[in-house]
Structure formats: structure tokens, C-alpha cells
Image (cartoon, coloured by chain):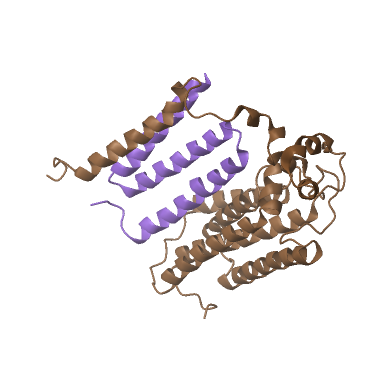
Amino acid sequence: MRETEFNVGKFFAFIFVAIIFLFMISPLFEEGSGLKLDTTLKDIKNRISYFHSLKSVKESERILQNYNDFSRYREIVDSAKTITLNESKDLENGSANLVTSIVLDYRGFDTLGELLVLFISILGLTIILSGLSFEKFKEPSFLQITGVKFITPFITLVSIYVFLHGHLSPGGGFPAGAMIATAALFSLIGYKYNYTLSTLKIIESKSGFLIVFLATCGLYFTGSFFGNFLPTGKVGELFSSILILIIYSLVGFKVGAELSTGIKTLYDGEKDANRQ
Amino acid sequence: MMFWIFIFIFVLSIILSIVSILVKDLLYSVLSLALLSLIASILFLILNAPDVAITEAAVGAALTTVIYIFGIRRTKREDE
């Protein structure tokens, strides 16, 4: 009976989705008209972000402050050194992946804020769920246990690869933490003896403390928060920018521990004896 | 060729999001959302953003699905 009624909410939802669809496909039919990028900005040498790709932000900032105008910008661009893989040494920031060098070095404070947001959301989840008590899940079947035991080591291996190579290839701490949490869920299904919430609490708090400690060390040694004070070797090697390697590993551990805490709380649904 | 791949991805994502709203069984709704984020990660990969694609596949397709399924298991499966 209720299905045949005219539903106003559904009607407006359809109109909303149709408008979004039109917006999505409209750029495909345009030919040159409409909003366009400034033609001088098409060449990346005319943008400030050119220095980010050359990893010489501090030097260019110093030069521009000395001349105090942007009319000499072109000369500074032309005099900047180019970077070649496996040859350039001792740069300002040694990571070969440009996204990582921006996310974790030039905009490191932003990543700290993201970590804080994730921490607060998991805190809310566990606070709400810790007062309730559910019945336990059913025992997993033989097939589930065998399959999960086969696939869990591979997921863990891939996640370790992703956060260790965060400065060389796409990836990094956040997706690695999500993969660790997936492996933690599988280990909850498949293995009899498992991690406890107190272990996760220790990992999470210590790695979070170390991230802020390293960032403050950068403030002490170089004068900027998240400043790079450890040596940066050749671009493209595994131990090329050691600070980014350490911080991304810590981010991976922290995110993995937080998400595993949420999943463990959702899975068990009982009050843990170790938690006060 | 690229044009039609984009059109296919857009149409599929719109269809999946409409299905996730309209279907009565909440488990199917969650599964269609997971498929939607998988398709979004393919789109990011085509648009040369592998960082975002990896994050979208790990968070959107795996973790949020698991959390939604736990929520459905704790409450009830059918929409009214």
C-alpha cells in the first residue's frame, strides 16, 4: 500500500541526482568555451609550485625576499637546479614522490590535523559502544578460518611495503593503516589468540607521541615545525629521506592501531577486562 | 574510446547510488556502496591520481563496508 503512494522525498532525490549527473557529463561536451585556465599558467615554470617540484622552496623564498618583488622570478626559475633520479644528492627533501614531499614535509601540519580528526572519531565510536553490550558473533566456519589464515600474511606484507615505500611510490601511511586494520579484522575471524585493546593503546599513544616529538625536533633544529633535520641521501633510494620514512611508518602504525581499535570494539561488543 | 569509458563509469556510479537508496535489504545497499567506491578508485587511477585511488580502495571498499555490516548485524537488516 505504501509503495504506490507518491513519495515527495524520493522525487526530490531523483531530481537532485539528475542535476548532479548533468553537471558530471557537461564538461565532456564543451569545446573550449566556459571557464579556462590562464594560458600563461599552463607552463609550470610560471607557477610557485615549480619550486615544490624542484625541492628548492627555502632558497627561492630567500631570494625573493631579498629582491622584494616578483619581476626577477624568471631569472630565479632559470637558475634553479634540475633534479635527476639516482644522482641528485642532499636536497632540501629527498623523497622521489612529489605528493609525499608536499603532504608530509611542506604541509606536514595538515597531516597532523588529519590524524587528530581520525583519533577523535574513533574516540567517539569507542565511547558510545563501550556502554552497550551485544551478544557475540557466531563461531566462524572451517572454510572462513582457512581462507583468512591464508590471506592475512599477504595483506600485512603489502601494508608494510606501502608505508615503507611511501616516499618512493604512491601510497603512504593512511592506506597502509587501513590495510593493517583489514588484516586485524581477518585475524579476529581466523586466529584463536589475538591482540588486546591495551596493546593497541600502547602502540597508538607511543607513535602519536613520537610524531609530535620529531616535529618539535624539526622546530628546534631548522626553525620550522616538521622541518627536515635528518640527512637526505640520493633521490630514489630506500634510505633517501629518513625523516619522512620514520614519520610515515609511525603514521601507518597509528592509523592501523586506531582503526583496529574501532573494529575490535565493534566485533567483540563486550567490555574488555583490561580497559578500566 | 576514453570518452565512452568515462560515460560508462558515470552511468554505472549513478545506477549504483540509486540502487543503494532504493533497495529494501540494507546489506545489498552497503554492497552497492562498496562497488561504487571501487569504481571511483578506478576513475582516480585513470585520471593519474594513484595515491587517492589506493586510499579510496582501502578505506571505501574495505573498511567502511565492514563497519556498515557490523552496524547492520547489531541492529536489523530490513528497511521498513
Q: What's the residue at 53%, 22% (across, down)?
A: B2
Q: Find residue B4 and report its horizontal and vertical position in percent.
A: 47, 21
Is A268 above or below relative to A149?
Answer: below
Q: Find residue A243 and report its horizontal and vertical position in percent.
A: 77, 57
Q: Is residue A15 left or right of residue B30?
A: left
Is B26 above or below relative to B74?
Answer: above
Quarter of the picture holding the N terminus of chain A: top left
Residue A158 visible here: yes
> Which quadrant of the figure has residue B68?
bottom left
Q: Is residue A239 left or right of residue A113?
A: right
> Which quadrant of the figure has residue A5?
top left
Is A80 above or below relative to A210?
Answer: above
Decide which of A103, A143 is in the foreground and name it: A103
Image hue for chain A: brown
Q: What's the residue at 71%, 62% (across, down)?
A: A225
Residue A97 visible here: no
Q: What's the residue at 78%, 36% (across, down)?
A: A77
Q: What's the residue at 71%, 48% (across, down)?
A: A101
Decide which of A124, B62 is in the foreground and name it: A124
Q: Which chain is purple?
A: B
Q: Is residue A154 left or right of residue B79?
A: right
Q: Find residue A263 and report its horizontal and vertical position in percent.
A: 50, 61
Q: Find residue A169 and report its horizontal and vertical position in percent.
A: 70, 42
